[in-house]
Amino acid sequence: MLDAHPAGIWRQGLRALSALANRLPSQCAVCHSWPTRRVCNACRARFAPQLARCATCACTVPDGVAQCGQCLRHPPPLDACLAAVNYAYPWAHLLAQFKFQGDPGWAAALAALMHQMPGAPTALAQADLVLPVPLAPARLRQRGYNQALLLARQLGSTRVQAQLLLRTRDSEAQSHLTRAERLHNLRGAFALDPLQAAQVMGRRVLLVDDVMTTGATLHAAAAPLREAGAKHITAMVLARTS
């Protein structure tokens, strides 16, 4: 059934555009080979190697190390954290196209990278709820779509819920803030829909976002889930900064 509401029509158009972009041959955005997918297999192999990562913050660690020293000293509010790539060339540039240049068609290609990383299929299969990290209201109006929601829908789970975890207010841009400032900036910025919050009790929750920098956003988003009784919280992101 078609959604006659303008916002619904917009969402349907974005999904159709993303699906079309994933099916049509195109030039690789990295090496410019043609015809291929948005990122060819050779570039995926070169720039998205499987790296050893901390189980709870996804930063890179030496082989055989399960958790980084920071997570051992200060356990995060996440039970697990998965990242597909480092936030570096070419992914930083491609994410900018996805987020800031009005190109939602990147969702399918980027979500495919996330789905192929170690642990992702299991995390998706075990999740009772898949929740995209919501955008601040002003930023959502400006951009027209939430990139985390597009990624979550492309991951293939039928358990995506876009209205359970809410962003309650706009907050200052985070790019220039320290981790402590980011945590303060995001305090109380997330809440659960009170009519749906009971769903979280005893459930396994998968949080989806595009980039993890200091972890402040994902940690703040996890807080109301913990308060509501979530049994297990995993974060899944495309890119992790160094």
Image (tube, rainbow, N blue to C red):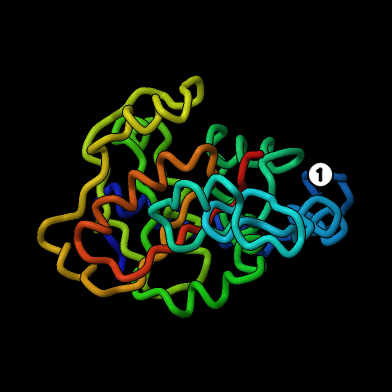
| Residue farthest along the top direction in this orientation | 176
Q: Give the residue drawn at x 52%, y 64%.
A: 154
Number of dots carrying numbers = 1
Whether residue 98 sits left or right of residue 46 in the image: it is left
Nearer to me, 129 or 53: 53
Vertical comparison of 71 with 135: above or below: below
Does dot 1 land on a helix, a strand or a loop?
loop
Nearer to me, 188 or 112: 188
Q: Give the residue drawn at x 42%, y 57%.
A: 78
| Percent position of residue 31, x then y | 87, 45
Q: Give the quarter of the image for residue 63.
A: bottom right
Nearer to me, 96 or 69: 69
What's under tag 1, amino acid-wise? Val
> Dot 1 corresponds to which residue?
30
Q: Which quadrant would the C terminus be assigned to in this image?
A: top right
Q: Which quadrant would the N terminus be assigned to in this image?
A: bottom left
Q: Give the residue drawn at x 57%, y 59%.
A: 82
Q: How dense is the environment of label 1, judged by Cα within 10 Å: few (below 14), some, or many (20 and up)?
A: some
| Percent position of residue 228, x then y | 19, 61
Whether residue 209 sits left or right of residue 101 in the image: it is left
| Percent position of residue 56, x then y | 52, 57
| Residue farthest along the front direction in this orientation | 73
Nearer to me, 30 or 231: 231
Q: Give the residue drawn at x 86%, y 45%.
A: 32
| Percent position of residue 198, x then y | 15, 68
